Amino acid sequence: NMAEISDKRERLKAKVEEMGIYFEKKGLSPMPGRVLAFLLLAEPPYQDFYSIQESLQASKSAISNALNHLQRDGVVDYITFSGDRRRYFRVNSKSWLDSIESKINDITTLRDLLTDVLHERKDSKYLDFNEGLETIVEFHTFIAGKVEALKAEWNALKAGK
């Protein structure tokens, strides 16, 4: 039914915009955010350059730059099919998960850096500032401990599947 198809297309368009705004708030530029949202919602979950461009109604250079950005970040890659010269872009969920884990591991990196900062500031007369940093280090230590427990639980769940 044409009305249902049109309705679904409008819902997807709205969802792409909503997700694009979310990704933009998380630091992605607007077009990579929209491309990522589109690829997450697309059927099939891989799309060629022109279908992405057509669906998002953006210039070739905007789509090209967005895809390059997402590929550089490891969130998107592409596949090809025998006999078809086109590249089909898709979300690389494994690489995306690795990226999330890397960001989680940054918690301990920042904690260690701030611990070094506190060591350098041990003779400082600005005790309030140092106490604020100590609280941040304590929070990161607390979170890091919880994250390690959660990762172990996650790995056990995945192993049990």
Image (cartoon, rainbow, N blue to C red):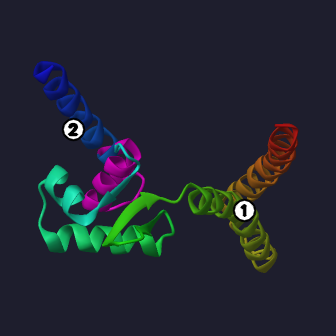
**Of 17 and 92, the residue lying toward us:** 92
Q: Hey, which residue is sitting farthest bottom in the picture?
A: 120
- Residue 13 is tagged as 2
Q: Nearer the viewer, mark 2 or mark 1?
A: 2
Q: Position of residue 110 (x, y in %)?
A: 69, 67
Cβ–Cβ below 8 Å for labels 2 and 1?
no
- Residue 161 is tagged as none
Q: Residue at (42%, 58%) from the top-left corner?
A: 90
Residue at image mark 1? 105
Main secondary structure of the magenta stretch: helix
Q: Residue at (11%, 54%) from the top-left corner?
A: 57
The residues colored magenta run 21-41
In the picture provided, is 23 more to the left or to the right than 131? Answer: left
Who comes first in sequence, dot 2 or dot 1? 2
Q: Residue at (80%, 76%) from the top-left corner?
A: 123
Circle 2 residues within 10 Å: few <14, some 14–19, many ≥20 = some
Determine the secondary structure under disc 1. Answer: helix
Q: Position of residue 138 (x, y in %)?
A: 79, 52
Asked whether 50 falls inside the magenta stretch, the response is no
Q: Residue at (38%, 46%) from the top-left corner?
A: 44
Q: Position of residue 51 (x, y in %)?
A: 21, 56
Asked whether 37 falls inside the magenta stretch, the response is yes
The quadrant in which residue 36 appears is: bottom left
In the picture provided, is 28 more to the left or to the right than 9? Answer: right
Task: Give the residue type that dot 1 points to.
Answer: Asn
Determine the secondary structure under disc 2. Answer: helix
Task: Give the residue type that dot 2 points to.
Answer: Lys
The quadrant in which residue 137 appears is: bottom right
Compared with residue 94, is residue 25 higher up or lower down, i.e. above or below?
A: above
